[in-house]
Every structure is written in C-alpha cells, then in structure tokens.
Image (tube, coloured by chain):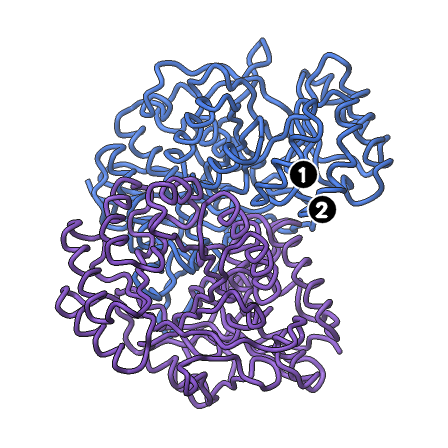
Chain colours: A purple, B blue
Amino acid sequence: MKIDSVDLFYLRMPEVLDIGDGSQDGIIFRVRAGNYEGWGEAAASPLTSIASWIAPMSHSGCHPVIDSVIGEELNSTSDIERISRKVKESSFYGIIQSDLTFSGIEVALWDLIGQAREVPVYQLLGYKKSEPKLPYASVLFGDTPEQTLQKAKSIRSAGFSAIKFGWGPYGRGSVEVDTAHVFAAREGIGKDAYLMIDAGTIFNENLEAASERLQSLSDAKVSWFEEPVAAAAVSLYKELSRMNPLVPLAGGEGAHNVFQAEDLIKNGGISYIQIDTGYVGGIGPAYQIANFAKNCGVQFVNHTFTSHSALSASMQPFAGLKDSWVAEYPMEPKLLCIELNDSKILPDKDGMISVPERPGLGISFSTDAITKYLVDVEIIVNKKTLYSSPTI
Amino acid sequence: MKIDSVDLFYLRMPEVLDIGDGSQDGIIFRVRAGNYEGWGEAAASPLTSIASWIAPMSHSGCHPVIDSVIGEELNSTSDIERISRKVKESSFYGIIQSDLTFSGIEVALWDLIGQAREVPVYQLLGYKKSEPKLPYASVLFGDTPEQTLQKAKSIRSAGFSAIKFGWGPYGRGSVEVDTAHVFAAREGIGKDAYLMIDAGTIFNENLEAASERLQSLSDAKVSWFEEPVAAAAVSLYKELSRMNPLVPLAGGEGAHNVFQAEDLIKNGGISYIQIDTGYVGGIGPAYQIANFAKNCGVQFVNHTFTSHSALSASMQPFAGLKDSWVAEYPMEPKLLCIELNDSKILPDKDGMISVPERPGLGISFSTDAITKYLVDVEIIVNKKTLYSSPTI
C-alpha cells in the first residue's frame, strides 16, 4: 500500500499558561494507507511543525517533510526506515524543526503497520515480551518547600514509590531554597522511595550553579539529577558527572536525532538517557538508542509529559529491555491530554505499568477531544493555501 | 532605546531547483530601534522560521521568538547577549527552528548597534583590525569529471587560488567516479592551489563509504574533506579523522548552537570549524566558537553560500584572527542573492578579501530586490492574522 494522506491536528487548551507544563497543546498526526490508519504525536510547537510540513522547498537539502512521505510505499517496518532516511537526506539543513515533525509521523507509521499486522509495536521491534516498568510520577515542584512536601506525601499515598520533581522554582532562587525543596520532597515520599530531580536545563551553561546543588542531591539520595545544563552541553554533563559520583545524571529529551543521544551517552557521562519518541525521530531511532544505551550500561527511560498515546509510543522502544525498568508517568496533564485517549495505561496490582497488548500503540484517540480542542489554522503562500486545519 | 519592530521578509526565486544551492530563497530580518535600523539573514527555511517567530506559546520553554525580542532594551552589545539568553531560556524545547530564526535577528542587532556607534561589527567584538582572508571559491561539482575539470580551470583563471567543490554527483555513484572528479578538480586548478572537497553530509552515517574516499583525497592533497557524515555524528567524525591524518576534516555548518560546535571541535577530531552566523545563533555565538577553536588549534572558517551581506556577517566573528586565514566566497549565487546587496566584498589586488570598513555589516540591502522577490505569506490562527508579509 501507499501513504495516501497525512493530517496534522493542532490541539490547544483554551488557556495556555507560562509554566513548564508541556501538556497544554499538541500536534497529532493521522496517517492513512490502504485500509489502515495510524496515529502519532510530536512534542513540538504545533504551528512551527505544520510549517515544516508544507514549507516551499529551499534547496535539495531543505525540503518540507511532506515531500518525503506522501505517496511512499508502506508495507513493512523497513519501509518506515527507508522513509526516515529519505526525510533525513531531504530535510537536513535549514529546516531542523522537521526532525520533530517527522517524529510524530514516524510513530503513526509504526501504529499503522501494527494495526495492519494486528500486533503491538514492541513485537514489530523484535521484542518477544514486554517487561513491566516501575512508573515514576512526574510532577512540578510546589511553589514553596511546604507545598512540595504535601505534594510528595499525597503522591506517595496514591501508591507511587518513585517520584520526580522538576521545574517550577528550582534553580530560580538560592541554593538554600532548592535544598529545602529537595529535602521536603524526600521527607514527603519517605526514605524507601525513589526520588528524582529535574532541573529542566535551568542552569544552561552555568556549571558552577549546577554543581552547587550536588551536595543536597547526594544527601537526599536522589536516583538522578536531570537536565542540569543545556541539552546540547555534552562537555558540561561530563564535568558535572565527575564532581559527585553519588549523583547520577540523566538527560536526552532534547536530542532530536540518534547522534545527539549517542554522543551524550558516550561523551556526557550520563547514567540515564531519556528519550521522547515524539522528538528524536520516532520509534525506530529511539529503539536504536535504547540498544546503544544497553551496550554502554546506561539505562533507557522514556520522556513523557503529555498523553497516554505518547506514553505508549515512548515505552515501545524499550518495552523488552529488563535492565531499563523505570518509566516516566505523566501525573498532572491538562484536560486536553486526559480526554485525548479513549483508554489509559494504568498501574497493575504491583504498581507496575506495561505497554498495551493491542495492535500498534494500543491506545486510541478520541475524535470528540480532537474536535473540541482543534485550532483553526490557515497558511497561504502567494495566494495558494498550503495548509488549512483538517476535519476529523 | 527599545526594539520597536522586527520585519521578516521571505524572498524566493521564481523557480527553485532541487539542487544543493542554498541561494534560491532567503529570510531577511529588519530590526528597528530608536532611529536606527539593522539587517540580518538566517540560513533557514523561510516559512518554518516565520512560524517559529509568531507561533502561539506552548509552555514556558516553548515561546515563539517574538516574545523575547520586541520591546527589549537595546543600547549596547551586552543587550544583544541578554536577549540571546532570553531566547535560549524561553524557546529551548519543541521549537528548535527558533535557533535559526533568531540567528538572523541577532545579526541585525549587531548591525544596528554598529550603525548607531558608527563602527564595523568586528570592532564591536573587540578586534582592533581586520585581517585579510584568502577567499576560496565555493562551487558545485560538474555533472561529469570533464565538466569539473573545465570549471576548475575557469575559476583558476578568474584569479582564485583556492577552490572548493561540493555536492552534485559526489558520493552518489562509485568511488571511481568520485575519484575522477577529485583528480579533475586538482588538475584543473593546478598543483599550487588549495583544493577542498565538500561531501555535503552525503554519507550520513555510512562511515565505510566515507572512508573509501580518503585515499583519493590524500592523493589529490586536499586541504580538507568537508561534512563527510551527518552534522551531528561527532563520533563518526572522530573515527574518520584517525583513519588518514593526511586528510583534515572540516564541519560545523549544521551546528545550531555553540555547544554543538564546541563538541565537534573537542570530540570530533576536526581541523576546521565552519560556522554560519545565520544558523548558529548569530555573531556573538560565532565569535565565542572562533575563540574556542583558536584555543584548540582549530581553524575557524565562515560558511556562506548566499549573499554578500551574509558573507560580511559570517566574516565578522573571526575578522581579527590571523591564524584563521581562509574565507568561503560564494561564486554561483542565484540572481536574488546578487541583487540583494547594493555593495559587494571584492578581492583586492592580492586576491584577498576583508570585511567592509563601514558601520555595522557595511553591506546595505536593496529595497528593489526585496520588493522584486518578496513572497506573499499569510498565517491565520483562529481567525487572527499572526503574520502577513510586510511592505518594505
């Protein structure tokens, strides 16, 4: 079969707040080929991604993504690889947003092949079975250490034994305030739970500021310190990793191709590589990174802050890896991301989560939610409409 | 003074060919503050960049570039640094195109401050004098080795003693054909001229294919082998650099931030770092890389394939560095890029080029050319026009 159509749906909450919450809007892709349909998401600015989909070609290395996708043969997973390569070779200069845009499409292609073959994506990847993962609740710090404490307590009593706090006030004030937040988080979840801290790149290239936080993190026995510096600051990661070996580093969500993730593993001294399939190029590239990480003794972790369809997409690449046993679990998504899926990935009686044993991603999209949150966009170039929001 | 306005002009040739020629369209930025005006360019897909300029905010880390620029104080070069930092902190996730978009704006900010102070940008950077550079003619390979030979001869007789051939058929056929092209280039320009070869990332992650070309390149005594693999494939660069030390490697035009360029210098084993100010974040980041390269014994080279305003912008960051003595010189730009500037950077009697001794970039933009090539764009989101092409 051939890829007949790709529809891009830009969804948005009626109000978007200036906070570190990536679940306030979304860009969803529906791919149709033959009698099948696949869906995927990118973790990307929707309007910018739409533009990279249909932008007029600038030169042979700067094609819009659409040129490499529509009309392509799609019968097997090797076709997905071939299409990915075509995008890389046609859109590698001046249109870097295409890496993110194609990520959502690539996920939809796997979902579609999974639907056609009636097997879950993880099996298409060659895994015989999926290993349950310990979900860690991923939440924002409270505004005050007291709020962080309460939040930690309530999440712990909700049954989570691993919690990650991030963003919010962290790194924006004094070392003392940050320390108070970290200790409050530890106190709230108890000594026996896993605690992770996510700096959200707040220290950018300020290695000293990041390093001043290490003592409190090691005192609080955190499992990892995430994104202390800018995503691409490989050498700074390396330096920081040497300063206090009791504080393992995590990073990688900003990697928009395989090379960057492998570079961070090889030269950045990280212990956990966190990959968003909606950012890194899709499920194929994420699988490649998961195996590279495994061979380097680094744990692979999904990056997911939005919907359960995105969660499934980001769990498939390491579903069969026993040694990579934790999974990020979005805890406070906005209504858009809650309503987006008709089914969810829920912890089992042991508190573990698994990818669905259903074809493709195994999570369906709600047409009602898409209709409800759809943003109306029109892009007109020299009187020609290159994009207008599709109907569902 | 405050930044009052930024206008984005999307220019395009009436016909754009599917070839490795980046001069077929362009995105130009005009910044106004107080009584001054500055201009800059990004090496980026125009429509995608426009979208990243005005896209509705997704979350605190995914703002459109406009949010960090309009209304900002702009009185000195430290304001440019501050604004750059603001963009980095507000647009670092999901809107990676913003790196390219802001590059053009950052260049315009330097131009504007240069106009206001009545000094060239290189002096604002702290250089006392500008050092003349040997321009290398940057051209595409011929379709056949015979065409490459003729092209080499004619460029040599036009007075150039350094020539770079790239793209076109290179890497698309057999090793033998590529060898024939390289030898033809060497024969055409003569034994005493500098010859560079640009693979344009054609071998992507195929290290073996790239390595098979090394012998011919060393036989032809090339000054460098450029972008043999994907821009971000730092480890592959390193491996290739060890295979034949007689073939120095060059790369970096795909770096869209300082970290990536420094990583390539530190971990990639390259001998030449090639930076486009319209890609890497602007003149400030390029200057930072130039100094990092100098301290690592790596030569800094501009990447310029378009206009003479882009040439000036990309030469300023290393204008004062004596050890970085070659400059890429666009030889075959399309009419758009020829007509875009009212003045040019021309070789002097010794065949050397220098940045203009005029305020700012020292190259003015032709309003006629902008009017002639302007593309009419309208982006409407929920009935609100977020962008429509400005008038000059």
Quadrant in which residue A205 is drawn: top left
CA neighbours of label 2 inside 10 A, class few (<14), some (14 to 19), many (20+):
some
Viewer-closest of B138 and A125: A125
**At numbered mark 2, what does the secondary structure look like: helix, strand or loop?**
loop
- The chain containing the residue under callout 1 comes to B
Is B93 placed above or below A3 here? above
The residue drawn where x is 24% and y is 38% is: B79
Q: Are marks 1 and 2 on the same chain?
A: yes
Quadrant showing the N terminus of chain B:
top left
Q: How many marks?
A: 2
**Which sits in the foreground, B149 or B243?**
B243
Residue on which the image places disc 1: B228
Q: Amino acid at mark 1?
A: Pro
User: In the figure, B280 relative to A27: above or below?
Assistant: above
Work out whether residue A71 or residue B117 is closer to the camera in this orientation and state it.
Answer: A71
Q: Measured from the top left, where is residue A136 in percent x and y?
A: 37, 71
Measured from the top left, where is residue B200 in percent x and y? 66, 40
Expressed as whole percent of the image width and height from the top left, the position of residue B155 reads: 72, 22
Residue A41 visible somewhere in the drawing: yes
Q: Which mark is residue A307?
A: none
Q: Residue at x 60, y 68 (%)?
A: A106
Residue marked by disc 2? B206
Residue visible at 24% across and 71% down in the picture: A189
Q: Could you tell me which chain the residue with mark 2 belongs to?
A: B
| Type of amino acid at the residue the image marks with label 2 | Asn
